[in-house]
Amino acid sequence: MERIKESIILISAFLITVSVPHSLQAATIDRILATVNDEFITLSDYRLYLKREGYSLQEGVDEAILKKMIEERLILKEARSRGITASDAEIEDMINEISKERGMSRDEIIEMLKGEEKDYRSILRDKILSMKLIMEEVDSKVVVDDRELEQFYKKNREHYRIEPERVEIETLFMALPPEASVTELTDLKLKALKLVKMLREGSDFEGAARIYGEFSRPGSFEKGALLNPLNDIAFTLKEGDISNPVWTDTGVYIIKVIKRLEAKYKPISDVRSQIYRILYENRKAELLNEWLKRLWGGAYISLKE
């Protein structure tokens, strides 16, 4: 009689165990990290997720990763509720994609997915369902037009520069005497203004420089290579222009622009597909975020401390 009672108790315990959802079983023996509607996400779930998605194991719980897990649960539930399906052929295609992306063999992929309550096919099937739903709700609604492409190109043209802007200049330099007096400083200012007037009226630049100061032969510089304030002034002048006196701590410069070479950029036709991908991904991220907010808003979610 006692053995019959023991058998009944054991059978009853077994039936209770198999009838309780996995999430409820786990909650009794594992730490609950979050509740998503009627499901739990446990610490064990979290660690398996790290392994499956290629994250390194770490102490504690990364809130961003946990949030991603919650979002995946919400997306999968929505996909199932809409009756979205995935074929065996699509599962095989996904295995091939993972193999190429991660450089793993089929056996390695299956091994990576071990330890889940479901077999690898079920796991991959769920991923496909979620991807299909995202394509329907987000990807299909992303629109990028030519106007946006052109605006992005103009705004970010420096990213597509292939040759910098350059300027070829010659300079006349007059040194400021050490500890110059007010009179010496005034004399140098007057001389510099007189020289600028002479040069603009046609006086030979090199000849004047050798008489009144130091001459620097033409040199070619890209924008930013010259020290300020010479850089700022040189790149505002046109070819043949002569600058006003440019003062520094050591003296005064007069700049003549011999030649200007404008920066060169890749044409928009060469980078159109690259820009399109950037705009597409940015817009997709915006739409995905908006859609996920709506999913969160319609669900009961509780994060545990």
Image: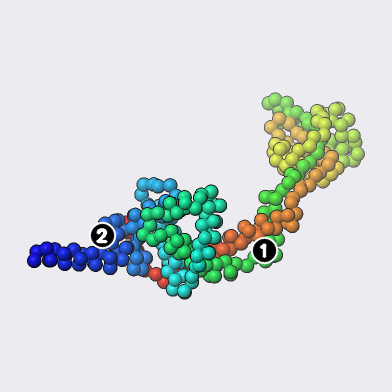
The residue at which mark 1 appears reads as 148
Disc 2 residue type (three-letter): Thr
Image spot of residue 301 (x, y percent): 37, 65
Nearer the N terminus, badge 2 or badge 1?
2
Residue 63 visible, this angle: no
Q: Under tag 1, what secondary structure?
A: helix
The residue at which mark 2 appears reads as 28
Residue at the image point whose x is 43% and y is 51% from the top: 111
Disc 1 residue type (three-letter): Glu
Assess disc 1: are there few (<14), some (14-19) or many (≥20) residues with their C-alpha within 10 Å of its C-alpha: few
Assess disc 2: are there few (<14), some (14-19) or many (≥20) residues with their C-alpha within 10 Å of its C-alpha: few
Image spot of residue 121 (x, y percent): 45, 61
Pointers 2 and 1 in contact (C-beta within 8 Å): no
Q: Under tag 2, what secondary structure?
A: helix
Q: Nearer the viewer, mark 2 or mark 1?
A: 2
Image spot of residue 58 (x, y percent): 39, 47
